[in-house]
Amino acid sequence: MEVALLGNPNTGKTSLFNELTGSYEYVGNWTGVTVDKKVGTLKKQMGQLIDLPGVYALNPISKDEGIASQYLLENRFTSALNIVDASQLSRNLHLTVQLLEFGKPLVIGLNMVDVAKSRGIAIDVNQLSEELNVPVLPIVARTGKGCHDILNYFSLKNQHVSHFTIDYGEKIEKAIENISDLLHEEQLNHRWLALQLLQGNRVVLDHIKINKGIDIERIQRIIQELDKHIEEVEKCSLVRTIYSKRKHIIDDILSKVITREKKSDLTFTDSIDSIVTNKFLGIPIFLGIMYFIFHMTFNWIGTPVSDWLDGFFSGPLSGWIGQGLQVVHATPFIRALVLNGLVAGVGGVIVFVPQMIVLFFFISLIEDSGYMARVALVMDRIMQAAGLNGKSFIPLVIGFGCNIPGIMAARSIEQPKERLITVLITPLMSCSARLAVYSLFAGAFFAKYQALVVLSLYVLGILLALVMAKIFSLFFKHEHSVFVVELPPYRIPNAKTLFRSTWDKSKGFVKKATTFILGGTVVIWLLSYAGPHGLNVDIDHSFLALVCGYIAPLVAPLGFGTWQAATALVSGFLAKEAVVSTMSIVYHAPHSGTLTGVISQAFTPLQAYTFMVFSLLYIPCLSTVPAIYKEVGTRKLTWFTVTYCVVLAYIVSLVIYQGGRLMGF
């Protein structure tokens, strides 16, 4: 069994996917979380569940929506699960109608029945099932309520196929019949294909063009003639006429299944939105929330625990491991590798895990509450000035966690120009890996103002991204911009979702530190341990110092022209966390106290802030580069992205450092 999970954006598809498969995929209460199909195994090993990107209709208007149409054309699945928002049935059922017309077994998961009830909407589920001629199962995907009924339904061998059809009128029906006669597809419903062609679905048109036996030109003539006739007679486009026919049927169905209780016109969501989406207050509120999150992360909760861990790694733990190595008579090489390489390098990154956990918790909290979609709305005016729209801000916010999913999320943007520009500027977002660098330097030099300093770096990244977006937009022809974003109701975040989201993000950070960073740390240590004159040389005469000594003069005008700083920046291309692990090695932190204490002696506050700015901007990490290439499609644009980031980082850092010196800092 292969079940396709389809629905409008922000209807709870990913939450339902997690409940039905027992796995965990990223859940965000805004449009564009699922940007590719995800595959999971249904509980009880009944088959596979395919989570497809959210779509309002099967005629795609963005790159990720095309994935859903393409998947339907593959026609491998045995049945479909359509999740609909009970509080937005009128809009959601347009997709349902098209899925019914596809002709595969279908079950409807009627989600958010709790939200509908709070709005005074009562739905006769049995009557809705009878009208659509398919099973309708009420659920609350966020809590898992009713989801076992869906699993029970799929355990049945004989699933129901609805014979739901709409009479679109004599002329359209005749065109459907004529087009169907010209199609030779054995696996697909000809009526559904004809309707999609009449609606201008480019994915379907490209699919049938592959079949050389189909008279494409005749099909296109039928569509053009019908479109011209509809325009002359009904003064309306063909696509609009089909939509109106479906809307009439949907409205008729809803009149039979929905009753509304008298409720206040102003909902709880409306009350909050009147403040947080206010054109004057919206952005200051967003910045205030981000400042509060950073304040909790660095000043109240995360930093005290990180400081304790830092002292533990550099003191008692190193001492215990050293004593243990002496007991087993480890060679000096092994002792140096473990203490100066592994413990110093990996430990230097692990100490920041508490801060990451706090940050990820609060980010997950505002994601699940529904606030992130409002951020895109309030940012729309600023984004428009940069040649984009508010929807482009969603990938940028996702990029705060990791640039890779942020780059992938750009697929949800409809306009090719805006989608490409968003991919190009997303690497400027301050991902969680960079946070380890900020934590180190902000803790060493700006202890009282850590939250403010880190917030300034996040804001700087956004501002520079907008400036670059404006510059890039000058080289593209103007496209009509469409900004459609779902504003879900505010919800009390689900404790299970919060825990899983925080754990998943934190686990990824730790996993990278103990695998990828571990390997890089060993290489860095070996280069620092060996030199032209043998092993166990003074680190200033090692291969590492020799090679990076040639790079140091290039960054000297930025204030950190030492081979140690150059080494950290080079390793940062592998992963931004490696900057910290490398510094733990090259500055001999285990022998000189905590890394924070050592760094405070090697940099000035101005140099420290400039170094953080350069780390923010200078180059996407190694794993981000392939993601950029996958989205932009050319090596030329990929190398352009890498190059402009380095040049931008150098210019901005030069201005900050030299300007700061002129002002006496």
Image: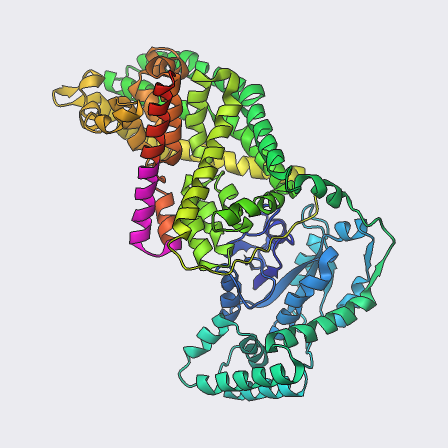
Left or right of 651 in this view: 442: right
Residue drawn at 36 percent across, 35 percent down: 575
State the colouring used for the structure image.
Answer: rainbow
Residue drawn at 27 percent across, 25 percent down: 557
Left or right of 384 in this view: 595: left
Q: Position of residue 312 (x, y in %)?
A: 45, 15
Q: What quarter of the picture does the N terminus occupy?
A: bottom right
Q: Quadrant of residue 102?
A: bottom right
Q: Position of residue 253 (x, y in %)?
A: 77, 70
Residue 373 seen from this side: yes
Q: How many discs appear? A: 0
Main SS type for the magenta part? helix
Is residue 153 located in the magenta-colored stretch of the structure?
A: no
Residue drawn at 52 percent across, 47 percent down: 383
The residue lying toward the viewer, choosing from 46 and 602, is 602
Residue drawn at 22 percent across, 21 percent down: 529
